[in-house]
Image (tube, helix red, strand yellow):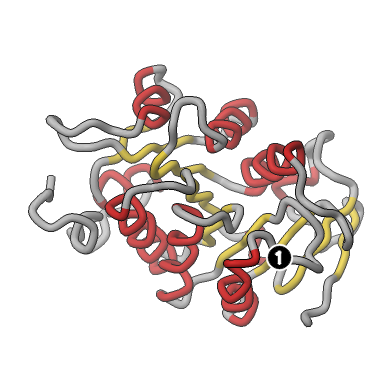
Amino acid sequence: MWEIKSCKKTDACYPNAMKGLTSAPDVLYYVGDIGICNNVVIAVVGKREAEERYLQIAKRIGEVLAKKGCTVLNGLAVGIDAYALEGAVSANGKTVAVMPGGLDEIYPKSNKKLADKIVQNGGCLISEYPNGTRPKKYTFVQRDKIQAMLSNKVFIVDAEKDGGTMHTADYATKLSKPLGCFVEVPGRSSPSGNQFLVDMHRASAVRDTDGLMKFLGQPEFEQMSLFDMADEGCHP
């Protein structure tokens, strides 16, 4: 079992992005290198029951961001979150997983091996909850808030308009964090939450890797399409 440490808001190790926020927790618990939270952190989030196409896009996005030197962050949930983290880890990138309960028991249990890989690869697991705290409905919502606090920008791969991912989007908006959403090419329906955020001018629309790099404020990435491994024949 790994060593679980704590960090007070007054400590130097406390993430810079959260120090000035009055609603940030006074104590964080963590495993691994909490210092990577001071790098460029991009939250890559989405729903659990995503189609394979969106799962592969999430994985590609994690890989692309890692190769650009970004720290990829989310809640380690099954579906989009896990695939984005897997993509980043596969590219030897740094990743952060924010937990909805104590770090003595990883949730969900099915992603325990991924949590191990995150730590072994120089990443970090973070929670505002001490050991013994089990996830509850409100802790998931609070976890989404921490994700927005720690991130420089938030990218949504696949979200329903009434889904839990919208909590992270709402917190990002309140904190004035830039939001990006994957949207389909004309003729294909985009996820309802993604389309809603774009239509309401709350998020930037991203269709390909060039668009992702523009969202990040960096040059395009080797002309590589997000669709290369996700859906052959659907290149923009």
Q: Considering only vertical position in the picture, is 164 above or below 125?
A: above
Q: Amino acid at mark 1?
A: Ile
Q: Considering only vertical position in the picture, is 227 above or below 110?
A: above
**Residue 183, image x and y in percent?**
28, 36
Q: Quadrant of the N terminus?
A: bottom right
In the picture of the structure, the residue carrying the numbered disc 1 is: 106
Q: Considering only vertical position in the picture, is 103 above or below 57?
A: below
Q: How many neighbours does mark 1 have within 10 angstroms: few (below 14), some (14-19), or many (20 or more)?
A: many
Q: Is residue 87 left or right of residue 43?
A: left
Q: Quadrant of residue 177?
A: top right
Looking at the picture, tell me which residue is in the foreground, 30 or 132: 132
**Residue 140, image x and y in percent?**
69, 43
Looking at the picture, tell me which residue is in the foreground, 101 or 19: 101
Element on which disc 1 rests: loop
**Residue at image location 59% in from the left, 37% down from the top:** 168
**Residue at image location 71% in from the left, 65% down from the top:** 106
**Residue at image location 45% in from the left, 52% down from the top:** 80
Q: Residue furthest top?
A: 200
Q: Is residue 86 left or right of residue 5?
A: left
**Residue 219, image x and y in percent?**
29, 54
